[in-house]
Image (tube, rainbow, N blue to C red):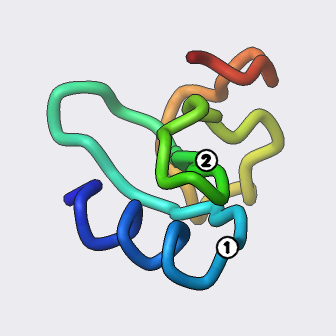
Amino acid sequence: MEAPWSQLARHDRVWLVIPFRDRDRPGNRAAVVDSTGQKRGEYTKYHLVPLAEPYPPGDGALRS
């Protein structure tokens, strides 16, 4: 999943925030990719939409 996003970030020299779901780790997550195409970390959403997101909340920290 990460390779096309890394290539796009590198090509356009932009940072990307890519939302995703992981079957093994419940939560509303996002990956952060820098302008060199390197994954800088993941974030798990802390403030969930009531009744719409049945996931456990994250702690708000960016994980690398």
- Nearer the observer, 44 or 17: 17
Tell me which amino acid carries mark 1.
Arg
Q: Which residue is mark 1?
A: 13
- Residue 51 in picture, x, y percent from top left: 62, 59
Gap between marks 1 and 2 measured at Cα:
14 Å
For this view, does 40 lie left or right of residue 38?
Answer: right
Image quadrant holding the N terminus, namely bottom left
State the SS at label 2: strand
Residue 36 in the image: above or below residue 40: below
Image quadrant holding the C terminus, namely top right
Q: Residue furthest bottom?
A: 12
State the SS at label 1: loop
- For the point 77% across and 18% down, the residue is 61
User: Which quadrant of the figure has residue 13?
Assistant: bottom right
Tell me which amino acid carries mark 2.
Val
Which label belongs to residue 43? none
- Residue 27 in picture, x, y percent from top left: 46, 37
For this view, does 31 lie left or right of residue 23?
Answer: right
Which label belongs to residue 32? 2
- For the point 29% across and 26% down, the residue is 25
Residue 53 in the image: above or below residue 10: above
Label 1 packing within 10 angstroms: few (<14), some (14-19), many (20+): few
